[in-house]
Every structure is written in structure tokens, then in C-alpha cells.
Amino acid sequence: MNSRRTTRHCFDGWHNGECCCNCANQLELKKHPGNKTIGKGQITETMGYVCIAKLDPIPEPIRQGVFLDHQHSYCELWKPREVTA
């Protein structure tokens, strides 16, 4: 049976274990062979990470993300990522 829990603490982010790597707002950004230069590669290759936290009061359905070239960081919009075990 699946149980829900938050991911492990990471001390590469904030001192209390909150990090982008265990935040529900972070997505892994993959490359695509159809890209001309930036992000060109296989879809199995990681290019970076994207934070999809809602930063501004922009009405839906406009969606935006912030690109990060590293997995570990922190901000005030952190929320725990839930995983199934």
C-alpha cells in the first residue's frame, strides 16, 4: 500500500532542511534533439531545473517558470514535495 510522506531534508539549501530539491514547485528540465543550440540533446539528459511557484498575481491560464542551472537553493515559496513510498 502507498503511503504519503515528504522527501528527505537537504542541507545544501536552507538550514532547516528545506531545499529546492525537495520542493513541490521544482521540475527537472530535459533537453530535446529538435532544439538548435540551447537545450539541444537527448530527452534523457537533464538541462537544469524549473521552479513553477506562482511568483506574481498573474491570472490563469498564464503559466511561467524560473530556470535554475542547479538543483539546490531555497526561497520563501518552498513547499514540501509529497512522494509515494
Image (spheres, rainbow, N blue to C red):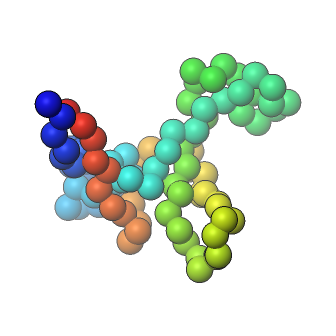
Residue 30 seen = yes
Tally of marks:
0
Residue 48 falls in image quadrant: top right
* Percent of width and height locating residue 8: 20, 44
Q: Which residue ends up furthest to the front in the rendered image?
A: 1
Image quadrant for the C terminus? top left
Looking at the image, is 66 positioned above or below residue 40? below
* Percent of width and height locating residue 74: 39, 60
Residue 12 seen = no
* Residue in the picture at 59% in, 76% down: 56
Image quadrant for the N terminus? top left
Looking at the image, is 52 positioned above or below residue 40? below
* Percent of width and height locating residue 16: 20, 61
* Percent of width and height locating residue 43: 63, 23
Q: Horizontally, is 42 left or right of 5 in the view?
A: right
* Residue in the picture at 51% in, 39% down: 28
* Residue in the picture at 49% in, 45% down: 27
Q: Horizontally, is 56 left or right of 37 in the view?
A: left
Residue 38 falls in image quadrant: top right
Looking at the image, is 18 positioned above or below residue 76? above
Residue 61 falls in image quadrant: bottom right
Q: Horizontally, is 7 left or right of 71 in the view?
A: left
Q: Which residue ends up furthest to the right in the rendered image?
A: 36
* Residue in the picture at 61% in, 57% down: 65
